[in-house]
Amino acid sequence: MMQEKLAIQLKQLRIEKGYSLEDLALKTRIASAKLARFESDEEVPSESALLLLSNALEIPVSNLVDGIQP
């Protein structure tokens, strides 16, 4: 359930920034297929991926994980 919240948060933030999966992939150097798995809750991002994502989305990493981790 908590991972699902992270997936939803990640997709919502990407859309709010106006980024496609391909745009975010270019900014993070994470494959768009992997990003899609993060957003569909099929895979959990590593700590390093969370850092790359937060930098690309121009938000603190805590915005991705606050209220999500037990």
Image: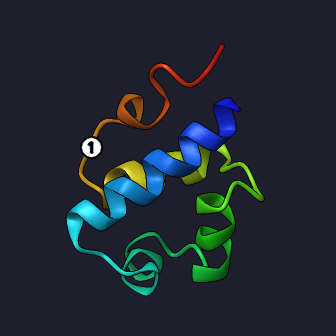
- Number of dots carrying numbers: 1
Residue 16, position in %: x, y?
23, 61
Above or below for 58 versus 59: below
Residue at (59%, 69%) from the top-left corner?
A: 35
Helix, strand, or loop for circle 1?
A: loop
Residue 41, position in %: x, y?
70, 54
Location of residue 18 by image quarter: bottom left
Q: Is residue 50 left or right of residue 54?
A: right
Quadrant in which the N terminus is drawn: top right
Q: Is residue 29 left or right of residue 54?
A: right
In the foreground, 28 or 32: 32
Above or below for 50 versus 22: above
Residue at (24%, 52%) from the top-left corner?
A: 58
Colour convention of the picture: rainbow
Q: 10 Å neighbourhood of mark 1: few (<14), some, or many (≥20)?
A: few
In the foreground, 30 or 15: 15
Residue type at tag 1: Ile
Residue 42, position in %: x, y?
77, 59
Location of residue 32 by image quarter: bottom right
Residue at (30%, 57%) from the top-left corner?
A: 57
- Residue at the far top in the pictured view: 70
Return the residue at label 1: 59
Above or below for 1 versus 29: above
Residue at (58%, 54%) from the top-left corner?
A: 49
Q: Is residue 60 left or right of residue 17?
A: right
- Residue at the far right in the pictured view: 42
Quadrant in which the C terminus is drawn: top right
- Residue at the far bottom in the pictured view: 22
